[in-house]
Structures are given as C-alpha cells and as structure tokens.
Amino acid sequence: MVIAPTSGGSPGTFATRVARLHADLARDGVPLADMRRAQSLELHMAGTPDRPSRPSGRTPGVEPVEGPIESRVVPPLPTNASGLRYFLDGAQRTFLVWRCGLVPVVATVAAAAVLTRDAAGRCEVVPGTLRLAHAFLIPRRNPASALADVLRRIDGLGMEVVDPLAAIEDDGDYAAAVADYGHLVELAYKAANGVRKGLEEDLLRVWAADPARATDPGWLVVDGSLRIAAPRAIGLVKQFTDPYLAGADAETLLMLAPGSRTTAFRPRPSDWRRQIRTDAVDGDDEADTAPTLWYLRLWDAAGLDARHALIRVEAGPDVRETARIDELSAWLMCERTPRATGDARWATLLYPVHFLERILKRRLEADTRGWPGG
C-alpha cells in the first residue's frame, strides 16, 4: 500500500498540524490522554521483524543457480571500479500521540529518495525522487465515541489514516486486538513500516518505468529486500527473517570468510512470492521470474557474532550468470570504503546509504520540529 504525501488541510509542518488538532480536541472536551512527550517508537522498536521467522525445524526450499551451496572468493577489483551509481532508501519517525481508553493513536512521518553518486564521489538526491508521507495509525472498526470523534476530525482535515488491524477479518478477533494496548502499539509500528515501504516500492516502480533507465548503465542499490523486480537493481538485506539456508548449507554461510560469497540460488515459489512482486503475466514460468539470491561477507567476523558483516544480495531474474554475480559482489566489496563508522550498523551499511539516511532524517526532523517528545 502506498501512502501519498498529505496534501489537504492547513499549512505547516506535521507537528504544527497535530498541535492544532490537539488544541481543538482539548477545547471541545474530547477525552484524550496526551502521549506526545514519549520517545519515538524507533528508539526502542527499530529492528523488530515485520513477521516471525519460519518455525524451527522447517527447511526452506531453494533451487541452485550455480550448483550446490559452497563458499567462493569474490574476485577483487580496484576501489573505484564499482558500477553502483544509485542508492534507494527510506526513513521514518513514529510517535505515540494520544490514548483513547485502551486504544493508542499513533502517527508516522516517512521519507524516501534515490541518491546518486558521480565519478568523483559527490553525492546528491536525484531531483524529483524525494517523497514524504504522513499517516495516523488507528483502528477504524466500531470505535468508541471519543476515538470516532478523533477519526472524523482527521478525515475532515484530509490526513491519512491506516488501520493497523486491517488484516483481521473476524469481528471477535478484531475486538480482542483493540483491547490489547501493548499489542496495538506493536501493530501500529509495523503499519508504520508499511507506510515507509510503500513509499520505497512506489519510488522503485517509478524508477524502473523511467525510459532513462534503458540507456543508463548505472546500477541501483535498494537498502532492503528487492520486493519489486527492476532492471539493474539489487537489494541488500541485513536482517534475515527468512533463513533460506539450513543444515550444512547454513554452516557454510556462517563460515564465510571476508570477501567470500555463497553460490547463488533461487527460493521456491511458495517462499519468494512473499518477498518480491513482478509484473509477470499468467503463464510465465515461475522459475524464470524468481529472484537470484546469495550471501556475502563484507568484513572479518573473528571473535564476533557469526552473522557479523553478512548481507543477502537479492537480484532480479536477469542475474543468473556467475560472471555477473561475481561482478556485483566485487562492486559491493568496493563499497566498503569509506566506512560509516559513526553508525553501529557500519559493517553492513554502505556509505552512500548512510549519507542518504542523514538527508532523510534531516527532512523528517524539519517536519516534526516542535513535537513535544522531540
């Protein structure tokens, strides 16, 4: 789901608009508990997976692209030889706003953009790619009177509302979820992640459809899973909620030396369709449209967690040949410098993505300046 930037209502930053709404609700005696001084949910929920890992004991199915899973050394390239020229990422800030009885009213502000880097290493946001979204995260079905009043006012201002319980069809289950404050906060945070991902996916879709991509040799790096197939694009996954490799294959993965990768594979259709969406027409061979995946170790993990500096690379179905897989892996190894050492995620964080995140966070700070918990 894509949430467009808020366009209706009164002018001003998101923080200003919410402050005005809060004043109006308080003036009219709507019973609300103000929670705006709480820290953003990202400060204590960032990294929470959007879905649980597969149950223990279940072996995911993969289909080999280069033969059995084994370790391969990536052919080294000069540090300036990377063909990666564009970097797509998003950022978000999610806030507790009010409490209506047991129901938390949560709001999120998200931004996404594409960064370009020229041959001299200079970086800037590609014009026209910066996108911003505002959304409230509130259960909509059968709200109590105070919450119904809040929803009417938000709708009247033209501000977006996303129901974090929209996936629950059964009325009894919905009512039970509405009565669980802590679970609602968790679901609202996941819905906020969905708002940000919607921005990123929409941006990637527009990027892939741009005729300029047909003649541009530069490759795009998406920070996260490549959920939409796009030409000359790869995704970099740093949190593995889908452990595709198990048993001896997983041991091979965890033993990867720095500068080595696993052989590439395709996930079986039952697994990969939840990860990537394509515009394939009926009758297309699923094996031909499945993504190509492999793991790469960027830095030495001696003495550290076995997953240190491991990334999963996701490429489209046009990447099947070993020469191309090696080339992309070598480009990623080139991207290790400069290092984003100011970030705890530096071992898997490409510096251009780090640079873009700083730009996006400044944009979010501008739109939430004056928020009581800021």
Image (cartoon, rainbow, N blue to C red):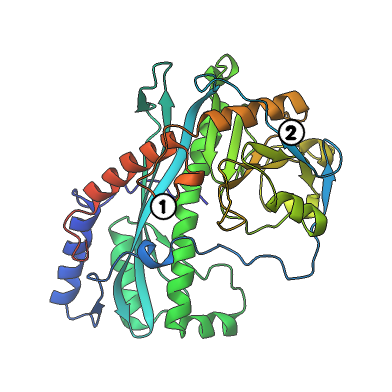
Give the CA separation, mark 1 to mark 2.
33 Å
**Which residue carries the number 2 mark?**
317
Residue furthest front in the image: 303
Q: Is residue 277 left or right of residue 302?
A: right
- Asked if 181 appears above or below 42 in the picture, the reply is below
How crowded pointer 1 is (Cα within 10 Å; few <14, some 14-19, many 20+) is rated as few
Is 245 in front, or is 6?
245
Q: Is residue 210 visible?
A: yes
Q: Is residue 187 above or below residue 193?
A: below
Residue 227 in percent (x, y) is at 61, 44
Of mark 1 and mark 2, the one earlier in the sequence is 2
| Disc 1 residue type (three-letter) | Ala
The label number, if any, that marks residue 344 in the structure image: 1
Q: Please give the name of the residue rendered at 36% of the width and 37% of the height, measured from the top-left corner.
A: 355
Q: Amino acid at mark 2?
A: Pro
Q: Residue at x 44, y 80 (%)?
A: 182
Residue drawn at x 38%, y 61% is 42
Give SS at disc 1.
Answer: loop
For residue 290, which quarter of the picture? top right
Asked whether 75 or 244 is in front, the reply is 75
Which callout, 1 or 2, points to the residue nearer the camera? Answer: 1
For image coordinates 51% across by 40% down, the residue present is 202
Report if residue 273 is visible in the image: no
- Residue 81 x %, y %: 54, 19
Image quadrant holding the C terminus, namely bottom left
Seen from the viewer's position, the closer of residues 325 and 97 is 325
Dot 2 falls on a residue whose secondary structure is loop
Numbered-mark total: 2
Q: Residues within 10 Å of mark 2 (few under 14, many from 20)?
A: some
Depth order, front residue of 85/328: 328
Please state the horizontal and vertical placement of residue 152, each as a whole percent of the image: 32, 68
